[in-house]
Image (cartoon, rainbow, N blue to C red):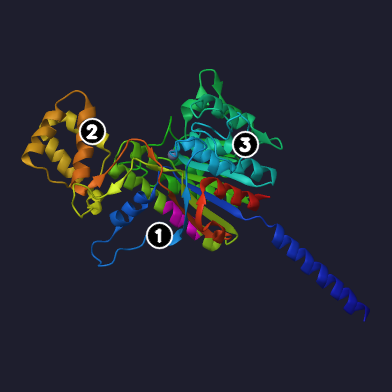
Amino acid sequence: MKWIITALICLTSSINSMAIAAETKHPNIIYIIGDGMGPAYTTAYRYFADNPATKTVESTIFDQLLTGMASTYPDDDTYVTDSAAAATALATGTKSYNGAIAMDHEKQHLTTLFEHAKAAHFNTGVVVTSQINHATPASFLSHNESRRNYDDIADSYIHNTVKGRQIADLMFGGGQQYFIRPNRNLVQEFNNLDYQYQSDINDLHKFTRLPALGLFAAKGLPPALGSEHPTRLNQMTHKALQLLTQEKTPFVLLIEASQIDWCGHSNDISCAMAEMDDLAATVTQVKQYIDKHPNTLMVMTADHSTGGLTLGSQNKYLWQGPILKQVKLMPAALAEMMQKQPDHAYQIWHNNTGIKLTDIAQASLTKLSAEPDPELLTHFIKTKIDQATLTGWTTKGHTAIDVQVFAYGVEADKFSGHMTNSDIAQRLFKLVQ
Ligand SMILES: [Zn+2]
């Protein structure tokens, strides 16, 4: 009888401790932001990626993971947010003014998801294709009254600590010029704090452990289109997940496809599709990771939409997205090639875009290629690509339309329906307490 009671007590206590362990096991959080990625971008990507050999339009990874929509208005009367105010809402759960980096109107610090996570002993990482002190990552790691204070924000990555530790255990992206300055070498300071450092994306494999700092360009990374590393976000994410996973501590990883926004600002659809392709590969990888590590949540959204992109123009019921697969170079790179050989401008154009031009347009191309300023030629190239694909834009800035929310993995059902951007952070806070 005695052994039965002892066994029962042991059994009960081990069940209890198992239950407690299961309750307190924090999930990993992978938070993905497509900067500027309004619904027109994921729609465009579906038709861009469509296999013309099949009758059906294949669904994309974005279609498969869609769960809701989010409004993005900032805390003022504009309805149109900038990246800083949106990232502040997405990072802190509180809306603020345009330009704010995790600060409210009274210039008070708003605690960020990463700060909450660090206090709960999570490891943290950011992987971006902009400079790592750009508005979105900065709103998770820093507090500043203005996104433009780049040096200040970079400095704060050393100074801002929770429990004596820097806020990010891993940072991959660009920004060497802000971290190695004539008056201060932050890379050396991170080295002194035991961070491994690499400056060449080809050396990603040399990272063996956290903490890790990778600055792979002076500012943002080269654009995906025409790059030696067209899926650099996916590559950096692969390494980040490997380093974070081997620690066996829950983690929060922020991944930003930063340059979708930059393509939108310059009204460049071929640039945007190349960035979307890198993001699609990244999200596919993250989904596969979650299938192997089920106690992980992925939430993805956009901070706003950029450029007022739309699919269809010139009063025609047609969008010719698949043409964009033949565009091999960024318009500025194409312009540079043409200016070196203005007599062969059309040949260069055709080889790199596959798009035929009228005789009048060919003559304009040759004429613009002979001019010293590349600005008009670059604009002409983008216009001709828009005309061939029937792509439309309403602005060089941001728009107020809602963005999509995507979720996968543990707790994904908490991110369905309509929400506003700050709700996303508030729901994530509950998972890092
Ligand atoms: Zn943005």
**Residue 369 figure quarter:** top left
Q: Which mark is residue 110?
A: 3
**Residue 94 figure quarter:** top right
| Label 1 sits on residue | 63
- Give x and y (percent) for residue 379: 23, 33
Closer to the camera in the image, 86 or 42: 86
Q: Amino acid at mark 1?
A: Asp
Instruction: Kindly give the residue lying farthest to the left in the view shown.
Output: 359
Question: How far apart are the two marked residues, 2 and 3, measured between alpha carbons?
Answer: 42 Å
Taking the spot 33% from the left edge, 46% from the top edge, the residue there is: 274
Q: Is residue 199 visible?
A: yes
**Which residues are the magenta region?**
281-288
Q: Is residue 215 visible?
A: no
Q: Is residue 394 above or below residue 149?
A: below
- Which callout, 2 or 3, points at the residue further toward the start of the chain? 3
Q: Secondary structure at mark 3?
A: loop
Q: Secondary structure at mark 2?
A: helix
Instruction: Kindly give the residue lying farthest to the front in the view shown.
Output: 77
* Mark 3 Cβ and ligand 1 under 8 Å apart: no
Q: Amino acid at mark 3?
A: Leu
Q: Is residue 72 above or below residue 146?
A: below
Question: How far apart are the two marked residues, 1 and 2, measured between alpha carbons?
Answer: 33 Å
* Ligand 1 picture quarter: top left
Taking the spot 45% from the left edge, 59% from the top edge, the residue there is: 65
* Horizontal relation, residue 395 to residue 23: left or right: left
